[in-house]
Amino acid sequence: MMLSPEEWSALLLSLRVSLWSVAIMLIPGIGCAWLLARKKFYSKALVDAIIHLPLVLPPVVVGYLLLLALGRRGWIGHWLYDNWGVEIAFTWRAAAIASAVMGFPLLVRAVRLAIELVDIRIEQAARTLGASPWRVFLTVTLPLSLPGILAGVILAIARSLGEFGATITFAGNIEGVTRTLPVAIFTYTQTPGGDPFAMRLVLISVVVSLAALIVSELLARRIQRRIGLAS
């Protein structure tokens, strides 16, 4: 099936946005997951609720809040534009940020469960041998949590590929700039005679999502075998 320039544009933009969204959320997501899994502190339940808030809020609400904060007149966006000339809203960067915010809770949840499954006695043994907390995290906790981290990354990518509400609110629907696969599908469904094109994009989305899931499963098995051999 040959893709038209518009379909290629939507597909490549969706992949670009999903990869950048994971890059944005990966380190903060792992940090938050470790914090929730290993630390006890006051208002932990509140922090956990705030992290998972995008899962229960309508995506349009998340997009509108991002627009208020990072738009050219927003309290952060205004400063970025005046001081650095950086404009975020209605660019591909806005689509990446919207996808990162929506996928962040899924990443945190998967990584947190993986860290909680790591036997804390192994970490304590490493500390008694003189390893610093950072070294314990990098050489013990992180490697043993890799399958869960991979699962979280795939969930975040899948969420990004399917993100619509926050993206169209914060990034808009600009062909070649912010028109990702879901936005392009919506556009074709609202265009007379656009149903065949929408169906083609639906099939493309299904193929890309299946490919991502298959690759993640193969990588997870490989990582688990390596961990099993190392132990």
Image (spheres, rainbow, N blue to C red):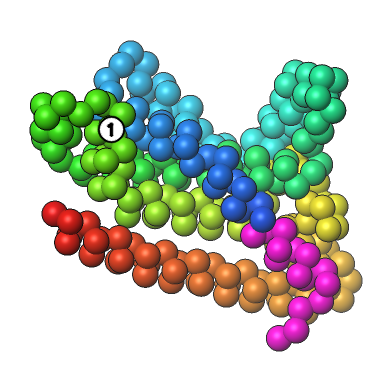
Question: Residue 164: percent from the left, percent from the top?
Answer: 68, 52
Q: Is residue 53 left or right of residue 117?
A: right
At mark 1, the secondary structure is: helix
Circle 1 packing at 10 Å, graded few (<14), some (14-19), many (20+), is some
Q: Quadrant of the C terminus?
A: bottom left
Q: Amino acid at mark 1?
A: Arg
Residue where numbered disc 1 is placed:
135
**Residue furthest out toward the bottom:** 1
The image shows residue 45 at horizontal and vertical percentages of 36, 23
Q: Quadrant of residue 218?
A: bottom left
Q: Residue at coordinates 37% horizontally, 16% vertically from top-left?
A: 43
Image vertical order of residue 220 relative to residue 75, above or below:
below
- The residue at 27%/41% (across/down) is 139
Magenta span: predominant SS is: helix
Front in this rendered view, residue 174 or 128: 128
Using the rendered view, name the quadrant where residue 71 is placed: top right
Query: What span is in magenta?
Result: 1-15
Residue ranking furthest to the top: 42
Q: Residue furthest right?
A: 192
Q: How many marks?
A: 1
The percent position of residue 64, horizontal first and vertical second, equals 72, 33
Is residue 60 visible from the viewing direction of this image?
no
Q: Is residue 40 visible?
A: yes
Q: Is residue 107 left or right of residue 161?
A: left
- Which residue is rendered at x = 42% and y = 23% of the image? 47
Q: Is residue 192 magenta?
A: no
Residue visible at 21% across and 44% down? 117
Image height of 136 relative to 195, above or below? above
Q: Is residue 24 above or below residue 211?
A: above
Q: Which quarter of the rendering shows the N terminus?
A: bottom right
Residue 4 within the segment the image draws in magenta: yes
Q: Position of residue 197 (x, y in %)?
A: 78, 75
